[in-house]
Amino acid sequence: MKKSLALGILIGIVVIVAVLIYVTSYKLQVTRSPSDTRLQAAATINPLADMVSQIGGEYVNVATILPPGSSPHTFEPAPEQINSAQNVKLFFAIGHGLDSWLKPIVDSVPNASTITVDHNIQLRDLPLDQRDADQPDQTVDPHYWLTVTNAKVILQNIADALIQADPIHKDVYAANLSSYLAELDQLDKDIKAQLSALSKHELITHHNAWGYFADAYGLKVVGTFEVSPGKEPTPQQIADLQNKVKQYSVSTIFSEPQLSDQSLKPFVQDLNLKIAVLDPEGGINNMGYIDLMRYNADTIANALK
Ligand SMILES: [Zn+2]
């Protein structure tokens, strides 16, 4: 064996072990001292936690339950994660099958409540060819946080919940809401201007997370590589996608950091395509919601220009 190859394998093993240690040791950051009088909250996914912290400011301590780099579709909470949530009073969730693993955690915490932030959101149905055959009941697309319009509604729902739980600070929460909504209005304008200038509009994505984003910004998701996140596509699904690549002259497949691209790589190589990475969660780089949306818009703009 060549030395460089042996060294490469060794480095690979070290990296894998380091990632495993990090993922298994990750716990909710809900440690607090007895003098911490902040409202204790947790959110299932990183973008939702960022929104809670934008509104809660100094009066709310918010933890993210889904570890960075994990997919909400395949996550199962470890007993330590359930134990470390015992101080939480308010849990924020997306619902619609995305974070149903929250239930055993909430059930273990006395006097906690769950706020599903979908109130007043116009939900979209998953197209028939993007539904998971293993989950026939899941017909609603749960990735609704990925448009700015919906984020504004989510933020209103968060503010309502915080004000109800902690009415003493209601003026602060209302002020935080209104200044953050103004930032989001600017974000929405920027993304619309950026993406409306593109000459191509068709996306093939790793999993079906981008329907709301596409609808909001004049794009179209024409195919999905893993209809069931974490499961390899069937030969028939691969053949359908190959046809879509040709039909729409697709040059880039949009992968995601939370999903393995093992089975995606041969497909991409066979068709001489490029891979660009979209991120629905933003946990790995600790991106807040605004940075996350800008990152995704930039990634699509660069790939489709
Ligand atoms: Zn998803």
Image (cartoon, rainbow, N blue to C red):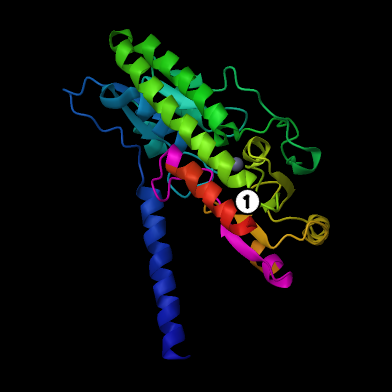
- Image-quarter location of ligand 1: top right
In the rendered image, which quarter is residue 288 located in? top left
- Callout 1: SS: loop
Q: Is label 1's Cβ within 8 Å of ligand 1? A: no
Q: Amino acid at mark 1?
A: Gly
In the rendered view, tell whether residue 253 sits above or below residue 163.
below
Give the extent of the magenta segment: 267-290
Q: Where is residue 50 drawn, in percent x and y? A: 40, 34
Q: Residue 129 location, x and y as percent?
A: 79, 43
Q: Is residue 237 above or below residue 268?
A: above
Q: Label 1: few (<14), some or many (≥20) within 10 Å?
A: some
In depth, the one of 162 and 106 nearer the eye is 162
Q: Is residue 14 left or right of residue 143?
A: left
Q: Residue at x 56, y 46 (%)?
A: 194
The quadrant of the picture occupied by the C terminus is bottom right
Number of numbered callouts drawn: 1
Can residue 249 be seen at all in this image of the molecule? yes
x%, y% of residue 38? Answer: 26, 21
What residue sits 29% from the left and 12% below the top?
169
Residue 232 occupies quadrant? bottom right
Q: Foreground: 92 or 152? A: 152
Q: Is residue 129 left or right of residue 296?
A: right
Q: In the shown orientation, is residue 260 left or right of residue 1?
A: right
Q: Is residue 285 magenta?
A: yes
Q: Work out whether residue 288 or residue 66 is closer to the camera in this orientation and state it.
A: 288
As drawn, the residue found furthest toward the bottom would be 2
Say which residue label 1 marks: 230
